[in-house]
Amino acid sequence: MSLKAGAIWVAILSLSMIEMGCSSDNESTTPAAFALTSPSFKSGDKIPDKFTCEGLPFGGGISPALNWTPGPAATKSYALILKDTSLSTKSPPDPHGFHWIMWSIPAGTHSLPEAMGGDQHPASPAGSEQYSGYPGPRATDGTDPQPYQYLGPCPSVGAAISGNDADRSNDNYAFVLYAVDKDVLDLPTQDPMANWAQPLDEYFDSIAIAQTELTGTSNAKPTAPPPG
């Protein structure tokens, strides 16, 4: 090989190494995709009974721990909703398909502990709010029930009424996380006679700059149908 040819090959090899190095640097600085996960189940799996109404009164169960990667750089808060997509995707959507929603979760928050919400559970992230349109059990003093904070999957109410496990339903569920670029939210007006979670979900879906979801299934059956 001539000296000239050898010099050309050295130049080509050096340029290739530089390009490889640039590619590696770019990959290392690329932010991870916006993704929602749980240590308790994989997306698409059956949601563990612990997080549903299985074997408990309607409204029983606790929320699973949730983790997510940061949203886009413009994210100022997050909103989270749990919905029964077997119902919420109907036309028109069935309001019973919307179970639980939390919003104004600070942008620096990237996880929620197990059993979030309610007086007996860990406090919500500072500044955040929760809602479920379903009323909880009536208090022992007879006062009106407060809405559940977390209402776990509970599709087999019909089986609880009939007493026949053959009447169980197996529904699809999704925890949907929205990244929002707003500090001040223009929330839809609450209708006290309707499940406010549905218009809240539509609002966050319309303003989100990114969204991700964790899906699962459940055929959970409560020990008794909803009160009242």
Image: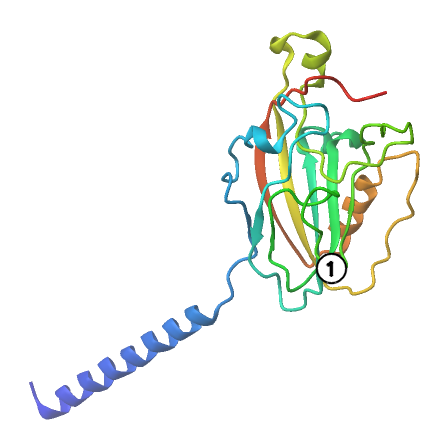
Q: Nearer the viewer, residue 78 or 25?
A: 78
Callout 1: helix, strand or loop? loop
- Image height of 75 relative to 135, above or below: below
The image quadrant that residue 85 belongs to is: top right
Q: Residue at x 68, y 32 (%)?
A: 84
Q: Is residue 92 among what the camera can see?
A: no
- Image height of 3 relative to 72, above or below: below
Residue 87 pos. (x, y %): 72, 29
The image quadrant that residue 181 belongs to is: bottom right
Residue 137 pos. (x, y %): 81, 28
Which color scheme did the rendering employ for the protein? Answer: rainbow
The image quadrant that residue 222 belongs to is: top right
Q: Is residue 183 among what the camera can see?
A: yes
- The N terminus is located in which quarter? bottom left
Q: Nearer the viewer, residue 141 or 91?
A: 141
- The C terminus is located in which quarter? top right
Residue extending furthest toward the front:
141
Residue 40 pos. (x, y %): 51, 40
The type of residue carrying mark 1 is Ala
Q: Which residue is mark 1?
A: 126
Residue extending furthest toward the bottom:
3
Residue 145 pos. (x, y %): 86, 32
Q: Residue at x 72, y 24 (%)?
A: 58
Mark 1: few, some, or many residues within 10 Å (few <14, many ≥20)?
A: few
Q: Nearer the viewer, residue 187 or 112?
A: 112
